[in-house]
Image (cartoon, rainbow, N blue to C red):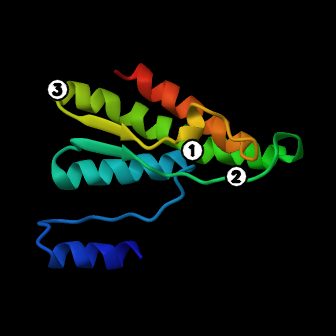
Amino acid sequence: LLETLAVELRAAGAPEVLVAALDVTDSAAQREALSDFEAKFDGITHLVLNAGISSRSRPWEDSWENVHRCLDVNLLAAVNAAEWMKPRMVARRAGTIVGVSSIAAARGLPDSGSYSTSKAALSTYLESLR
């Protein structure tokens, strides 16, 4: 799917497109991909933190594994990428980090406790980057 999108972007005139399929919860793989992108494009000017999974279970029915997975994907993967990129962007005196959260961050959803928690934490973290 990513390579198909890359082909379409190139056909539409994008000068260079580089894709990487990886598990965002693998911090070493994530940082390696970011490093590759940085080398290929002489720096990263925009970082979009968009990885996320949903969870639909009431808090008292949720498993620890599900809670952990939501936090890993929705929060910790984003923090890992941002923390790795921040000093590089600061050193270049250029860069923007954008995170995709949810309305569930402001108003927890009754059937999505893990999801709401992870998105609330992400929103708070992103606010702290200002």
Packing grade of label 3 (10 A; few <14, some 14-19, many >=20) is few
The image shows a total of numbered marks equal to 3
Q: Residue 99: horizontal and vertical position, in percent?
A: 41, 40
* Callout 1 touching callout 2 (CB < 8 Å): no
Label 1 – label 3 distance at C-alpha: 27 Å
Image quarter in which the C terminus is found: top left
User: Compared to 29, does 67 lie above or below?
Assistant: above
| Quadrant of residue 3 within the rendered picture | bottom left
State which tag comes first along the sequence, 2 or 3: 2
Label 2 – label 3 distance at C-alpha: 38 Å
Q: Nearer the viewer, mark 1 or mark 2?
A: 2
State which tag comes first along the sequence, 1 or 2: 2
Residue at the spot of label 1: 74
Amino acid on which the number 1 mark rests in the picture: Asn
Q: Residue 20: horizontal and vertical position, in percent?
A: 39, 63
Label 1 – label 2 distance at C-alpha: 11 Å
Q: Residue 69: horizontal and vertical position, in percent?
A: 69, 48
State which tag comes first along the sequence, 1 or 3: 1
Residue at the spot 40% in from the left edge and 35% down from the top edge: 82
